[in-house]
């Protein structure tokens, strides 16, 4: 039987860190070594994961309280070990995990996780140039000539559909603000990064229909038709200009 290679060791050590099963590491230990000493490495990795979740989900952490969040974090970590050693975006499916353990957490927990995650995704999205007014003229001409997809949402844009209105609660927890307005309005939130800052806003039916249509069809004209059908009294040009100015649109 051939001796284990360094790559074998790394794979076996990674298996131990993620599962706690040290059996595969016995090959590398001397007869007198106590496998219990390995726990220091696993405990260190678990703490790093927990610290990452606390950093990545600050509003959820404050909403649940430290002890409840730590219990959630432990449950999540043991079932969703990170696949990347860079933990800056760890917790991709935490909201879905919370939903899967029904009735264990307060009402806003899933939505708090969604909003925290969207903020993080927008923050770390790739950079790209914004569309100019001249770009829009060219893109509309292309659409008229070929009926092709010409535009998309910028890579940092995230659309979040909440279970219930809770944006004001999230803002208060995220930025530690008091005396915010009562929860009301749309359950659809858009987040995006522009000029190195993450922005957010609630979308009404008119705005959501246009932004969603851009995301799905990539057509300015098609999105405008859908939005106008949803609310003929609204001004599509004002909405479009606002999206353009905010850096929400990009070329395909």
Image (cartoon, rainbow, N blue to C red):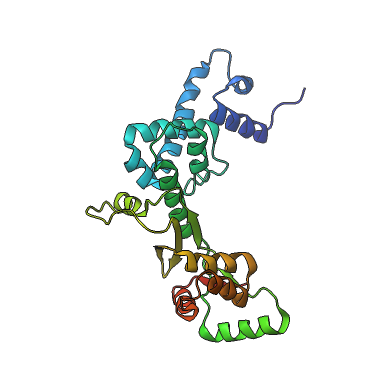
Q: Which quadrant would the C terminus be assigned to in this image?
A: bottom right
**Looking at the image, which residue is at 72% across and 26% down?**
3
**Looking at the image, which residue is at 60% across and 23% down?**
25
Near-viewer residue (20 or 59): 59
- The total of numbered circles placed on residues is 0
Up-down: is 74 above or below 197? above
Find residue 89 and report its horizontal and vertical position in percent: 49, 49
User: Image quarter for residue 220?
Assistant: bottom right
Q: Which quadrant would the N terminus be assigned to in this image?
A: top right
Find the residue positioned furthest to the left.
179
Near-viewer residue (189 or 155): 189
Up-down: is 92 above or below 79? below
Asked if one can make out residue 198 in the rendered structure from this viewpoint, the answer is: yes
Asked if one can make out residue 154 in the rendered structure from this viewpoint, the answer is: no
Q: Is residue 80 left or right of residue 2?
A: left
Find residue 51 and report its horizontal and vertical position in percent: 40, 40
Q: Is residue 42 left or right of residue 14?
A: left
Find the residue positioned furthest to the top.
32
Find residue 82 and report its horizontal and vertical position in percent: 54, 40
User: Image quarter for residue 175?
Assistant: bottom left
Up-down: is 80 above or below 132? above
**Looking at the image, which residue is at 37% across and 51% down?**
166
Near-viewer residue (227 or 78): 227
Find residue 223 and report its horizontal and vertical position in percent: 58, 72
Near-viewer residue (39 or 92): 92
């Amino acid at each position: 039987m051939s001796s284990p290679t360094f790559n074998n060791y790394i794979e076996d050590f990674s298996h131990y860190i993620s599962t706690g099963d040290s059996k595969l590491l016995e090959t590398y230990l001397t007869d007198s070594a106590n496998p219990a000493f390995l726990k220091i490495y696993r405990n260190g990795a678990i703490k790093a994961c927990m610290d990452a979740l606390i950093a990545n989900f600050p509003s959820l952490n404050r909403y649940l309280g430290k002890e409840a969040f730590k219990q959630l974090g432990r449950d999540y970590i043991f079932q969703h070990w990170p696949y990347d050693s860079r933990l800056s975006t760890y917790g991709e499916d935490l909201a879905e995990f919370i939903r899967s353990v029904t009735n264990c957490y307060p009402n806003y927990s899933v939505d708090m996780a969604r909003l925290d995650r969207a903020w993080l995704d927008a923050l770390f999205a790739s950079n790209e140039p914004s569309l100019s007014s001249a770009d829009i003229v060219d893109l509309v001409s292309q659409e008229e000539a070929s009926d092709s997809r010409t535009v998309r949402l910028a890579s940092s844009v995230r659309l979040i559909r909440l279970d219930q209105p809770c944006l004001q609660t999230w803002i208060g927890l995220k930025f530690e603000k008091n005396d915010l307005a009562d929860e009301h309005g749309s359950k659809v939130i858009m987040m995006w990064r522009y000029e190195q800052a993450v922005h957010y806003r609630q979308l009404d039916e008119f705005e959501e229909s246009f932004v969603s249509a851009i995301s799905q069809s990539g057509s300015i004209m098609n999105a405008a038709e859908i939005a106008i059908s949803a609310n003929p009294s609204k001004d599509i040009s004002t909405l479009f200009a606002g999206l353009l100015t905010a850096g929400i649109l990009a070329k395909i």
